[in-house]
Amino acid sequence: MKDSGIKISGLSLKLNGKRILSDISFKVEQGEFFCVIGRNGAGKSTLLKCICGIMGGYEGEINIRGRRSAGMPARDRSRLVAYVPQGSRSDVPYTVRDFLELSRYPWRGVSSKTNDAREVAEAMDMTGTAAFADRRLSSLSGGERQKVMIASAIAQGTDAILMDEPTTYLDYAHQMETMDMMTRVNSLRGVSMIIVTHDINLAAELSGASGTVAAMSAGRIEWMGPPSGLFDADRLNGIFGVPFRRYRADTPGGRQILAPERTVL
């Protein structure tokens, strides 16, 4: 049976003599939501860049669907993992449709033009981007460009999508749309999702009952477990360095929300 998912074993990385990642190990099962939380500078974004092949020079191993990532041709890796970086450039000189068609490059020579067109159309349909398919990316709002970045990752046709702070800079309406898109893609295509975020409520909601959350601090994973484990004020205090309070919404079901507790000086 072919191995599935993404397996990280003893991943460590130094940059300019400074240790950025230290002995990180975990497994993301196929179709799983895996959220990584932590303070700025904890190493979250660097971890994603190592997994998707942007950054090398690490110790340890990254295996994607049973294949060792180190030494894997970039095109092969791009058929397995898609990456959505934090923020999006506004000066890309392409229309939305052209940009999504470029996402099919890893499959050139393997996939037919008809199949490529179908993948692009499905990606636009799933993200609601068909309405501005012929507009240039430079003319879109931040929220619209984020939709296009996610559509690009979907069109790439991979088994896993890595997202770095996907809701940063978005207003509440676009945050909700982005979350809906991620859960829809996960549900319809069984794609593994690795999400980096500092928003613990987003991590808890996306991971659901069966996902996993990993908390990073100073390049290490300090805690890993089910989303329910986030609702521990002492644990969050240790991760983020500020006290947290748990609130329960006054609604049927009583959804729980976590927020930093402000200390009055």
Image (cartoon, rainbow, N blue to C red):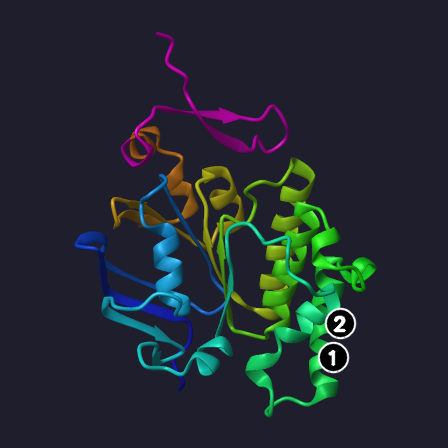
Amino acid under disc 2: Ala
Q: Are marks 1 and 2 in contact (CB under 8 Å)?
A: yes
Q: Secondary structure at mark 1?
A: helix
Q: Secondary structure at mark 2?
A: helix
Q: Which residue is mark 2?
A: 121
Q: Position of residue 191 (x, y in %)?
A: 54, 68
Say which residue appears at 39% left-offset and 70% top-offset. Answer: 53
Q: Nearer the viewer, residue 85 or 248?
A: 85
Q: Nearer the viewer, residue 203 or 92?
A: 92
Say which residue appears at 33% left-offset and 33% top-offset. Answer: 240
- For disc 1, the neighbor class at 10 Å (few under 14, some 14 to 19, many from 20) is some
Q: Position of residue 60 (x, y in %)?
A: 22, 69
Q: Which residue is mark 1?
A: 117
Q: Is residue 38 above or below residue 118?
A: above
Residue extent of the magenta highlight? 238-265
Residue 5 can be seen, yes or no: yes
Q: Position of residue 179 (x, y in %)?
A: 61, 49
